[in-house]
Amino acid sequence: MKKLSLPTVLFMTLATVFTGCKDQGDKSNGALTSNAAERVYVEPGQYDEFYAFLSGGFSGQMSVYGIPSGRLLKVVPVFSQDPEKGYGYNEETKPMLNTTHGFIPWDDTHHPDMSQTNGKLDGRWIFMNGNNTPRVARISLSTFETEEIMEIPNSAGNHNSAFVTENTEYVVAGTRFSVPIPQKDMPIKDYKGNFKASLSFLSVDQDSGEMDLSFQIRLPGFNYDLAHPGRDKSHGWIFITTYNTEEAHTLQEVNASQNDKDFIAAVNWKKAEEYIKEGKFKTEKAEYAHNIFDEDTHMATSTIKDEVRVLDASELPGLVYFLPTPKSPHGCDVDPTGEYIIGNGKLSADLTVHSFSKMLDAIENEKFDGEAYNIPILNFEDVLGGTVKQPGLGPLHTEFDGKGNAYTTFFISSEVVKWNVGTWEVLDRKPTYYSPGHLSIPGGNSQEPWGKYVLAMNKITKDRYLPTGPEMNHSAQLYDISGEKMELLSDFPTIGEPHYASMAPADLIAPNSKKIYKLSENKHPHAATSPADVRVERDGNEVHVYMTMVRSHLNPDNIEGIKVGDKVYFHLTNLEQDFDVPHGFAVIGAENAELLVMPGSTETLVWEPKKVGVWPFYCTDFCSALHQEMSGYIRVSPEGSNTELKWSLGEE
Ligand SMILES: [Cu+2]
């Protein structure tokens, strides 16, 4: 066994001490003031002031909460199949989960980021990463549906993603793990110097939101963790934390913690655009899927693309610089002015803050302290903007309130610490229950935060709720940060493992929320928008049922002439034109899920009956007083029988 380094031993010891529960805090709810309840209470019929969009971590989805109440408003399926909504099970959305590895019905979501205009949140879309099979999704904040998924080639572990630049020019996605590029069969021990990393720039169409993989930057074979685009004065740059600059391929917990400092990579993407214009890229073969949900037809298509433009940072001067940052930095956060870049060194006693203007000055005067793979390393002292001395243990992430303060989560010492940007003085600290990862302030990673609340997303819940077996749902905690001191207001359980959350004022989102899909605009090729369109058609052993749904019947509700061995496509159109009247559809023995069809739209469920009989189907979503009557029968005859194909509604 190799010798453990001192910082690692220290980290492990502290982890044991601090991730215990109860004994370190007050067993009460931790709220300081008696009116905390009033401040999170939203009266029946009243609305929350903010939306919070939380990644679902290993659930693969995004959950939407109201803040300050902590009420769960919706779970939006993104990378995982969702039987509740039929997402990834119905014929329309299956192509959304297509990749070059095949149909991948799950992923690990980490960082939702909202579109911005002039450095301010604009409430149009949320972009979010799939960590495992590298992908970036775009979710509409009008329909609250996933409209697009782009696979990221030459990447492995798309953790460092998805980050939106100041005018949503790009969504930036970096690889966590370095790998052979292109992938090939080679010994793992030959990692060092041979594995490489990619940073992808997905351009965004400003009308449709559609993404395109514009180019990639090839980087040395370190691990790339988190990033933030510059803003205001640093617009045009993106800052990315690295770890494992040791390029270790085994026992990383020891071998990737040897160097005193890793790096923040400062990437000049405006320079990258110039290089692209000058043709300094290589076009490389790389297959990746691009999946789009069409707004008019409500059907997704998956296209496999096969090329990417690559800029090599080791060959193109001025593209990337390394800022030495102690010690295995995790979060990388940029303050609202764009001047300060905060490196949250997981194993570091202090928080290191780099200065953007000092960085530019150091670059101009070539104050370099060596290079890594031909990329200049800037001198630590020359770029240092400030140090927050011993603010806590295990810093992970920082956000800003727009009033000159920063808030950092400390995983090991389980707390949120408020400090001043500029004097670097610690102003306040409050415990979290327990071990927070990210935190979020509405607009807290933009030029214009709404510094009223901070939400800490805790990894460990332990004794905060009634026990629910060996696992407790992760917990979020809401703090009021409008005053000088933070005040803990409430706890609420979350879904999966929320990493980051994007929060925004309700006024920015709610007015644009879609109420219905207009039936007159339904362009689904299998829609039945009137009784005249209702029919059943056979084509060999494929049967297509064109069915409508309206309170409180399915049309047709009697179908005969189906045989064992048939493949039945139920195309359901919801004729309702009222807000919040979806109808569901389920049929016995279906191997997929239900359908949940929104007003005015069409969805398709495939059913392969295996047993002879007369089988019921029904509406799953309680829609009217006569919802229980919203059902029908389908008769399945033996294979080869000559039962006549017929369908009806209301015939005796
Ligand atoms: Cu119904």
Image (cartoon, rainbow, N blue to C red):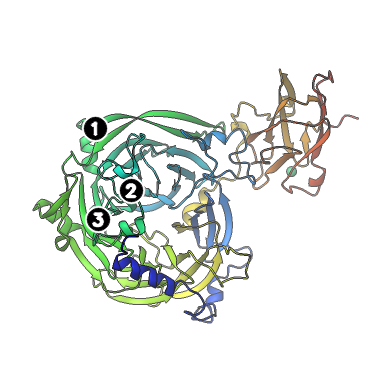
The residue pinned by badge 2 equals 165
The residue pinned by badge 3 equals 263
Residue that appears at 59% across and 29% down: 523
Q: Does the residue labelled 2 lie within 8 Å of ligand 1?
A: no
Q: In this view, does 540 lie above or below 283?
A: above
Residue nearest the observer in this picture, 510 or 469: 469
- Which circle's residue, 3 or 2, is located before the other in the chain? 2
Q: Is mark 1 on a helix, strand or loop?
A: loop
Left or right, residue 357 beside residue 119: left
Instruction: Name the front one of labels 2 and 1.
Output: 1
**The image quarter in which residue 46 lies:** bottom right
- Which circle's residue, 1 or 3, is located before the other in the chain? 3
- Which circle's residue, 2 or 1, is located before the other in the chain? 2
Instruction: Name the front one of labels 3 and 2.
Output: 3
Expressed as whole percent of the image width and height from the top left, the position of residue 448 reads 35, 59
Left or right, residue 162 beside residue 462: left
Query: Mark 3 is on which residue type?
Result: Phe
The quadrant of the rendered image in which ligand 1 is seen is top right
Which numbered dot is residue 281?
Answer: 1
Residue that appears at 31% across and 72% down: 419
Mark 3 Cα shell of 10 Å, populated few (<14), some (14-19), many (≥20): many
**The image quarter in which residue 533 lies:** top right
Q: How far apart are marks 1 and 3 (CA)?
A: 25 Å
**The image quarter in which residue 89 lies:** top right
Mark 1 Cα shell of 10 Å, populated few (<14), some (14-19), many (≥20): some
Q: In this view, does 511 lie above or below 530?
A: below
